[in-house]
Image (spheres, rainbow, N blue to C red):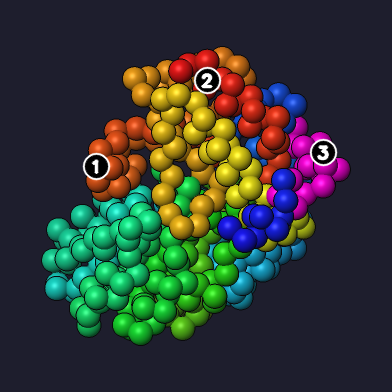
Amino acid sequence: MEDIRQAGPGGGFSSDEVARARADTPGCAKVIHFNNAGAALMPRQVVDAAVRHLRLEADMGGYEAAAHAAGSIESLYDSAACLLGCDREEIAVVDNATRAWDMAFYGIPFRPGDRVLTSMAEYGSNFIAYLQVAERHGVRVDVVPNDEHGQISVDALRAAVDERVRVISLTHVPTNGGLVNPAAEVGKIAREAGALYLLDACQSVGQLPVDVREIGCDLLSTTGRKYLRGPRGTGLLYVRREILDRLVPPVLDLHAATWTARDRYEMRPDARRFETWEANYAAQLGLGAAIEHALDWGLQRIGARVARLAETLREQLAEIPGVRVRDLGVRRCGITTFTLDGVAADRVRSAVAAQGINVSVSRTASTRLDMDDRALAEVVRASVHYYNTEEEIAAVARAVRTCA
Ligand SMILES: *Cc1c(COP(=O)(O)O)cnc(C)c1O
């Protein structure tokens, strides 16, 4: 919050910088985009990198194009390592955040009686995996309650850990609200307990600084298309070097391992043992450009502006009769959620869309525990990015006011 106030009304961006961010984003001229938590608008640098490679594949052949671009493809690992504060050997590039998370979670050699500790705002896909592993391996899943601010209760977590806890699995920023869970405090507890710590950072990476060493997580998953502004169908997994051999990759192929003799194989010595051979290199090069673009602006600065804009949006929405802003937490980010009394979320979304504004709807099934706990079936989600403006925020508020 201190960051936000220091950053002033523009969130630390000058009007020239906002103009440059928008000029670099072709979509800004076409739509008012408040679905950045779904998929943000790509900068032209990202589109160019991806399209250039696709053309190269068409012109010279896919394998030949990959060989030609090998240096740039490799430098994606350096960019990702710089983004997350780790080493390049600790990065795997995969198809999406779900696959990244799955490779980590299903790679944990669970034994009957092991416990998984998780939080109320857990993402639906993750929870389905907990249920499957509970069924398959006799693992117990325990949900740590929230504190009075609606974030994971660090005290309750500390009280819940024992030697049976195999993994603490936390969503950093939930898909259905603006709260930022206290990931680093959870990291301290995980270290003390000797438990693995898996962080779903799908909604946080790209909108605020996320440093794996500061947080103290062993595993982190994220996606390319959300706040990072990369192409769809890209994701990253971080695996802390020291725990690599404690995981058993759920699948292996001839990229993840080498077939060394008729009856033997050797796994790669790095996190790329969680990848597969075939990849969409055009999209990966786009992701590399997206990460470089974010690093150029600076994640601290992006985070300050995003938080400032989202606070402005919440303030303006809260003034509209019947609107209830639903975001929880001590620290809040760019995801803004609300309901409008007596109006279905889909009606709000389509009324707003008629004004050329993209928002989305988040429903029970994506975060069931949290939604049930708050007796919510759906919320409208308006997620801001640094290229959004105060004028766009006013337009969203006007459009919502018309529905009310
Ligand atoms: C979107 C999302 C995911 C899934 O990411 P994909 O790239 O679609 O697999 C996982 N966790 C959270 C919290 C999300 O919001």
Q: Measuring 53% from the left and 55% from the top, which residue is drawn there?
A: 204
Question: Which comes sooner in the sequence, label 1 or label 2?
Answer: 1
Q: Which mark is residue 217?
A: none
Q: CA distance from mark 3 to mark 1?
A: 42 Å
Q: Amino acid at mark 3?
A: Ala
Viewer-nearest residue: 177 or 53: 177
Circle 3 sits on which residue?
Answer: 19
Region of the chain picked out in magenta, as a range: 10-26
Q: Please identify the quarter of the rendering in which residue 159 is found.
A: bottom left
The answer to whether the residues at label 1 and label 2 have Cβ atoms under 8 Å apart is no
Q: Secondary structure at mark 2?
A: helix
Return the residue at label 1: 372
Q: Looking at the picture, does residue 39 appear above or below residue 342?
A: below
Which amino acid does the dot numbered 2 rest on? Answer: Arg
SS at circle 1? helix
Residue 6: image location, x then y, percent = 70, 58
